[in-house]
Image (cartoon, helix red, strand yellow):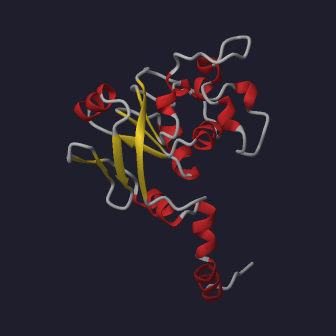
């Protein structure tokens, strides 16, 4: 996992409520255990017609969406079944952060464990972001802030341990591996007794 300290990017806006994980990455793309190529299946049923041709009016297919690393989504993003493939697909497509007024708990946890930053903002900030697609934002992970182009800075909540892992570019197993010497010392001080 790559360390995530700051994201500077334009936004792409998908103002749809209740986008579930099957919309993010349809179940038929869940046959892999690797992340590579999952971006091709991101929002597949929304991005493509039944014959496989692109829907030019879908927001991620528009030229102005190319290179945007921040997705501004409608309320209750990532609801539905648990699947790590959803944040994997977003990351493989180039999305580094998702902003909404509400992000489903399981999706949020899966995102944080895989290096995708889920950000919950207040309704007025969200409304501004929805109305201003393509806005250039700066997200400071250490400070837990989002800087808008008008100079306004908004704080967002994030669990301290999750923030530490993002900043260090590690997952939970990586954190435990960093503690190997301390764990061994602790075990030596407490001999096992059958």
Taking the spot 35% from the left edge, 42% from the top edge, the residue there is: 136
List x then y, in percent, for residue 162.
47, 57
Looking at the rendered image, the quarter that the C terminus falls into is: bottom right
Q: Position of residue 155 (x, y in %)?
A: 27, 49
Q: Residue at x 79, y 34 (%)?
A: 31
- Residue at 43% x, 21% y: name it: 17
On the rendered image, what quadrant is the N terminus found in?
Answer: bottom right
Vertically, is 21 above or below 167? above
Q: Is residue 50 left or right of residue 42?
A: right
**Location of residue 71 in the rendering, given as x and y in whole percent from the top left corner:** 45, 35
Image quadrant in which you'd find residue 192: bottom right
Q: Quadrant of residue 134?
A: top left
Q: Which of 178 and 141 lies nearest the eye of the viewer?
A: 141
Residue in the foreground of this view, choosing between 119 and 193: 119
Residue in the foreground of this view, choosing between 97 and 138: 138
When asked about the image quadrant of residue 137, the answer is top left
Q: Which of the pair 112/97 is nearer the observer?
A: 97
Residue 105 in picture, x, y percent from top left:
47, 38
The residue furthest front is 63
- Residue farthest along the right direction in this orientation: 31
Asked whether, in this view, residue 105 is left or right of residue 150, the answer is: right
């Amino acid at each position: 996992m790559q360390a995530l300290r700051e994201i500077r990017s334009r936004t792409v806006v998908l103002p749809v409520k209740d986008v579930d994980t099957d919309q993010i990455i349809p179940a038929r793309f869940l046959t892999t255990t690797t992340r590579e190529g999952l971006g091709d299946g991101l929002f597949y049923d929304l991005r493509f017609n039944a014959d496989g041709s692109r829907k030019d009016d879908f927001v991620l297919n528009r030229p102005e969406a190319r290179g945007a690393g921040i997705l501004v989504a409608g309320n209750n993003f990532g609801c539905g079944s648990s699947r790590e493939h959803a944040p994997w697909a977003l990351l493989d497509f180039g999305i580094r952060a998702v902003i909404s007024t509400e992000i489903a708990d399981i999706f949020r946890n899966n995102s944080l464990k895989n290096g995708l930053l889920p950000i919950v903002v207040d309704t007025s900030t969200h409304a501004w972001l929805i109305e201003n697609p393509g806005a250039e934002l700066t997200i400071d992970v250490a400070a837990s802030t989002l800087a808008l182009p008008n100079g306004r800075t908004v704080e967002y909540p994030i669990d301290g341990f999750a923030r530490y892992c993002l900043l260090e570019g590690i997952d939970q197993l990586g954190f435990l591996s960093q503690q190997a010497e301390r764990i061994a010392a602790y075990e030596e001080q407490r001999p096992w007794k059958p």
